[in-house]
Image (tube, grey):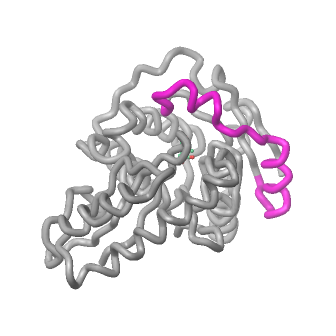
Amino acid sequence: MVVFWRKKDLSGHLEAIRDSGGTIGLVPTMGALHKGHLSLVEKAVEENDVTVVTIFVNPTQFNDPSDLEAYPRTLDQDLKILQTIKTDLVFVPSVKEMYPVENTQVFDLGGLDNVMEGKQRKGHFNGVAQIVSRLFRLTSPTRAYFGQKDFQQLVIVRHLVKILEMNIDIVGCPIVREKDGLAMSSRNVRLSREERKLSPFIYKTLKQAAAQKRTLTPAGIRSWVTEEFRKQPGIELEYFDIVEDKALRPVINWDEKVNKVGCIAVQIGGIRLIDNLNFD
Ligand code: PAF
């Protein structure tokens, strides 16, 4: 495994691989790696000649400075884990290396950034688009891997490659869960014991909500979920919605011929957790 800190060293190395006809798989991460990330890396290793994992806590996607500061950073451990799963290349740039001057680029994300996470975290997806587009330009990957846990991000990255006319296959990978159902996330380590005990309620409620499709309308399910969280102390519901899986429009009727996803965000002890489930 080779670790790069500089853009020019990484791009030089990748150019040689591309010139010899090799495929490149990119796994962008912010580190604090868990089994969810590893499933992305394993898939990339399986499907490509060379896999690049990037570790960069991207400041431009944090609208809350205290959230940026509290974001877990575990580089030594991350590198050890990546070595055990046969990662070829790791890119660990500094903020200066990625943004030598302030990045003011604004992307037209087609309104996909105005709902759900985008409503709660102003500018978040523009920041994601800034870093992801830079990493795409730098590595020109054949495929790039993103987790379905960040469902809205996945939809927006697919939109991004379209508007930038980049020929990159965006691969969405299934959510990896703890035994009790909590979706794996780098933020989970910040939960106290008590908060961690509460957290399976999120997935349990999503599953119960999906099971009520026969008896409740989408609006009825939205109200039911809101009520369940109102009755549950210690967890604050930020939003729950059932949306169409491409345009992210709220679903009104079950008979709409679109794939439907139930998306949720909550706060437990000030820590934001998101999850989603197929509602087809
Ligand atoms: O999903 C993440 O960890 C980040 O949003 C990403 C895609 C690595 C961009 O910083």
Residue furthest top in the image: 101
Q: Is residue 73 magenta?
A: yes
Tell me if I can see residue 24 in this picture: no
Q: Position of residue 49 (x, y in %)?
A: 69, 63
Residue sitting at x 82%, y 46%: 2
Q: Quadrant of ligand 1?
A: top right
Left or right: 163, with 16 as reference point: left
Query: With respect to residue 280, does 5 lie above or below?
Result: above
Q: Nearer the viewer, residue 72 or 126?
A: 72
Q: Position of residue 154 (x, y in %)?
A: 43, 55
Q: Nearer the viewer, residue 112 or 255?
A: 255
Query: With respect to residue 145, does 30 lie above or below?
Result: above
Residue sitting at x 84%, y 56%: 83
Query: With respect to residue 211, does 253 lie above or below?
Result: above
Q: Is residue 116 magenta?
A: no
Left or right: 213, with 238 as reference point: left
State which quarter of the image contains the C terminus: bottom left
Residue sitting at x 63%, y 52%: 188
Tell me if I can see residue 251 in this picture: yes
Q: Position of residue 132 (x, y in %)?
A: 50, 41
Count of numbered badges drawn on the protein: 0
Query: With respect to residue 262, does 114 lie above or below?
Result: above
Q: Position of residue 268 (x, y in %)?
A: 53, 48
Instruction: Name which quarter of the figure residue 190 lies in.
Output: top right
Residue sitting at x 24%, y 56%: 247
Q: Main secondary structure of the magenta part?
A: helix
Q: Which residues are magenta?
A: 61-88
Instruction: Name which quarter of the figure residue 57 lies in.
Output: top right
